[in-house]
Image (cartoon, rainbow, N blue to C red):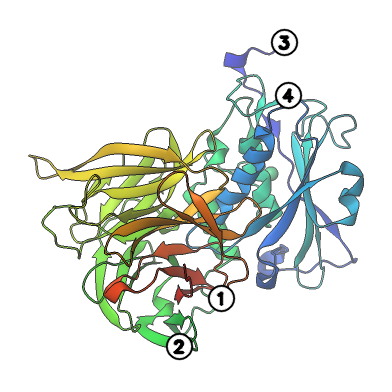
Amino acid sequence: MIRADSVRTPWIIAAAALLAAGAAPARAEGGRTLLRWGGEEMPIPYYIERGGAGDILDGSDIEAIQSAFQTWEHVATGRVEFQFAGLIDAAAEEEIASVVMWLDEEWPYDSSFVAKTRLSYDPRDGRILRAEILLNGRDYRWSTDGDSGALDVQNVATHEVGHFIGLRDSAAGGQAMFEYILLGETGKRYLSDADIDGVRANYPLAGRDGRGEIALRVLRAGAAAGEHPTGIPAERFTGICALGPARGPGQAAAVVSARDGEVAVSVIGPGGEAAGEYAIPAVPVHPGRIRAVSALDVAGDGIRSAIAALARAPEGLDVWIATTGRSIRLPVRGAEDVTAFAPLPPGEPPFGDAVAVAGKRRSGDVFVSIVRPRADAAGGITLEPLRSWSVPGSSGVRGIAVADRVDGGSEIVLLSRTPAGGFELLSWLPPFSAFPLDGRPFQPDARAAAAALTAGGNPLGIAAVHGGSPAIIVPVAR
Ligand SMILES: [Zn+2]
């Protein structure tokens, strides 16, 4: 008999079973095979077997698996991207690419294994060719609602997706890759700093040698793309964490980068020139957790030069103000993740001097909230929540842009990822309407962020990280 409050027997999650095509597997230094997907494979497509978990009938099991893949994709200092390719029948799974499926009747492993990830790879170089995540539906109940007597789908799937990208089990507790699991556990939904470092090591954002200079690619509709050096040497950084709009005079984009645990924000002008750099001292968060950067008028004095970085801390969501090093907690109730934020135009009712925040709730809903920063009597900052909306049909908002309209007003545009892995623009206000980006001359990758390029009434631009380099794309005619 198992009592939910006294489960102490851990179940082993299997280390990845390696199905090599040849006899002699490749060996990395130290004698261990380094398994990874090639950069040209990104985004990595995966299917989910249509039946899902036998215990779950509302589709939340399918959504929980997608959330697990996105958790690894969101590591800001690494570059791994997935594309949900759709639901598939069990009979067809052997013919296609990677798949996630529950086995409800026959489980080929010991019943102590709750899941198993099998990898096929090229034995010559360790390149992963196909992955198969098997979940044990024969011996365990599964849930998505915190049932203390069942396995949490996202919790287990996040661990297995780590194997999917070549990571190994960890013997240290508190990590998503820890090799033991409990019923009702949800802690593996969130990556530890060690998990994040694993992604960064296997999938570095700026190339393995880290050489060269970070260039800003400026693409404009009807004109050739231009490369503009920024003066930021790439070897200084472990990765580009985020890219966002900077609303100061002549500023086009802000890039957050990281090096040896330090975080810096570089502001880049519209021609690609370096326009300033802010160190963020003693940021109490791993750079890989930083989600977005933006200019933020926290003092309400109209000064637009303060740069904020937003990150997911283990205990919640925090904003750091680059110019002061102060940190404040973002009071977005029930949010599991925040993926973008942007200041709204000053003084414009009803949300003047406020900040738009986008993220995902624990329920899986994508939301946009409006919050207003206020200086308090003690010299700190509080954020007052004003309104919140859900964004239907989106798997995540990657950027918020405040764009000038021809009539002199402004509007908010969201850069949103579709469940199928593409991107679309969603216009303010609710109900949101979609403008698919498919067929545009430039397709931002999973690290895309939206930025408003409003100088002189220019059309909306999208700031994105593409192939490890920041880019500003201005092809979006409306
Ligand atoms: Zn494992």
- Residue contact at pointers 3 and 2, CB within 8 angstroms: no
Q: Secondary structure at mark 4?
A: loop
Compare marks 3 and 2 and give the one earlier in the sequence.
Answer: 3
Nearer to the camera, 198 or 344: 344
State the mark number for residue 208.
Answer: 1
Label 2 and label 1: CA atoms lie apart by: 25 Å
Compare marks 4 and 3 and give the one earlier in the sequence.
Answer: 3
Residue 138 image point, x, y percent = 83, 27
Compare marks 1 and 3 and give the one earlier in the sequence.
Answer: 3
- Ligand 1 closer than 8 Å to label 3 CB: no
- Amino acid under label 2? Gly
From the image, state whether disc 1 or disc 4 is nearer to you. 4
- Residue contact at pointers 4 and 3, CB within 8 angstroms: no
From the image, state whether disc 2 or disc 1 is nearer to you. 2
Residue picked out by circle 3: 1
Residue picked out by circle 4: 141
- Amino acid under label 3? Met
- Residue contact at pointers 1 and 3, CB within 8 angstroms: no
Q: Is residue 345 visible?
A: yes
Q: Secondary structure at mark 2?
A: strand
Q: Residue at x 33, y 56 (%)?
A: 342
Q: Quadrant of ligand 1?
A: top right
